Image (cartoon, helix red, strand yellow):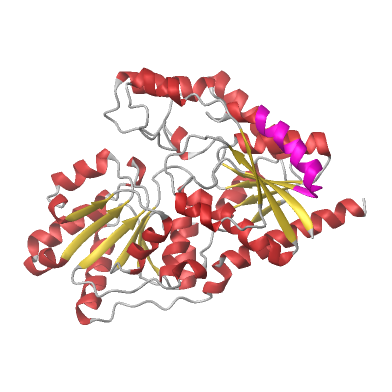
Amino acid sequence: MNNVLIVTYYFPPSGGPGVQRVLKFAKYLPEFGWEPTVLTVEGGEYPDYDDSLLEEIPRSTNVVRARTIEPYTLYRLFTGKRSKEKIPVGVLSMHEHASLRERLANQVRANLFIPDARIGWIPFAVRAGKKAIRDRRASIIFTTSPPHSAALVGARLRKAAGLPFVADLRDPWLEIDYYQGFRRTKLATAIDARLERKALSRADAIITISPSLGDLIRSKRYNRNVHVITNGYDEDDFRGIPRQEVSRFTIAHVGNAGAQRNPRMLFSVLSALAARESEFRKDLKLQFVGNVDRSIHEELRALGLEELSEFVPYVPHRRALEFMVNASILLLVINQNEQNRGILTGKLFDYIGARRPVLAVGPVGGDADRILRESGAGVLVDHDERTRTEDVVQDFYRRWKSGSLTVETRDGEQYSRRAQAKHLSILFDSLIAGTRHA
């Protein structure tokens, strides 16, 4: 069996959607002839922790943890945050009421820590990676990012070891959402662009999670060997989750809801329907599971919807799936930014696996819209489509009242984590075959 060195900053006990992608690759790659060695961080700074995921790491997976130097202790001291207060992944996309200290700290983060605040991990990860390659006789290097520092680790290991290098990009590099509308110096942007070119041009293949993101990478001409492997869901995760009778029309958003995921038009429509129809107001329940940005709380309060809402703090992945399975409909909100047509969150595929109807708010014709149409899992409306949004909500509500609110997904197997691991193994096999015949 071949061995692959997987380089990832986010790995259990880290929680969050990015962890699921790499954790499931580690689970299913051995079925297709690839034994993973995971190189991750020791004592890293995670926005969420989920110790239950430690139990899901396959026993055969060798995990190597490299130390790091994190800047977030200084960030907390400067901004006055508590020592154990979690720092969000997109720390730059802070709420509009951020303090002067927070704004200044963000400027420093964006213009000095390039490509990201995980650069203190790079030298330690490279050293540990070289040793892991020798000890485990790895045949290929696979990195997943963000943080894009992981791709720089992969590029250095590729140069040192001479092994094929595959870079997995779950988000764009320069165009990542938390830089949208943010003031970076020309020098910082130029340095970041050079690092992006260096890492991606050195990769033997690049993987993205959506066709639109793949097109963006190809347009830069750093590397034409670009493949799409979407996120997916693991059928095993849903086994044994009880389905309960729901007494209210529950619209559930499961996962972190940042400022750029504020579906203002949908909230306005729900508020108007609740004011106009007393029965709808009595039945309606908005449920938010995960961290919710302050701006969304303010929006709900202003529209009179906060009293109809339930807020559940971050929960372990298994518990999150329970909320999905027992919702009436599942709310998916695509970030409002220039690259949103290519956003395919891991949450979308867990929603498909939960087999509950999905109401998505985002760009019509984008990659999420296409998958919802192809799978039959739900409906997407634009952020500004008031009439269509109202029609869709009322249709869902009528079907819920009549007991006919069900969903039958089509071709769901292609979005399974096992199928995605198979696609990745085929790419690995082709690269290894190419080096052997070179």
Instruction: Relative to 403, say whether 308 is above or below.
Output: above
The image shows residue 325 at horizontal and vertical percentages of 35, 68
Residue drawn at 30 percent across, 45 percent down: 292
Q: Tell me which secondary structure the magenta stretch mostly adopts.
A: helix
Q: Which is nearer the eye, 298 or 180?
A: 298
Residue drawn at 40 percent across, 37 percent down: 88
Q: Which is nearer the eye, 232 or 304?
A: 232
Q: Is residue 184 visible?
A: no
Q: Is residue 310 visible?
A: yes
**Left or right: 84 as drawn, with respect to 20:** left
Residue drawn at 14 percent across, 67 percent down: 283
Magenta span: 123-140
The image shows residue 395 at horizontal and vertical percentages of 25, 73
**Quadrant of image for the N terminus:** bottom right
Q: Could you say which quadrant of the image residue 362 lies in?
A: bottom left
Asked if residue 130 lies in the magenta stretch, the reply is yes
Residue reaching furthest to the right: 437
Instruction: Relative to 65, say whether 136 is above or below.
Output: below
Q: Which is nearer the eye, 28 or 287?
A: 28
**Left or right: 434 as drawn, with respect to 30:** right
Residue drawn at 75 percent across, 63 percent down: 33
Asked if residue 183 lies in the magenta stretch, the reply is no
How many numbered dots are placed on residues in this image?
A: 0
**Left or right: 1 as drawn, with respect to 187:** right
The image shows residue 379 at horizontal and vertical percentages of 37, 66
Q: Which is nearer the eye, 223 or 321?
A: 321
The image shows residue 297 at horizontal and vertical percentages of 22, 43
Instruction: Relative to 419, say whether 97 is above or below.
Output: above
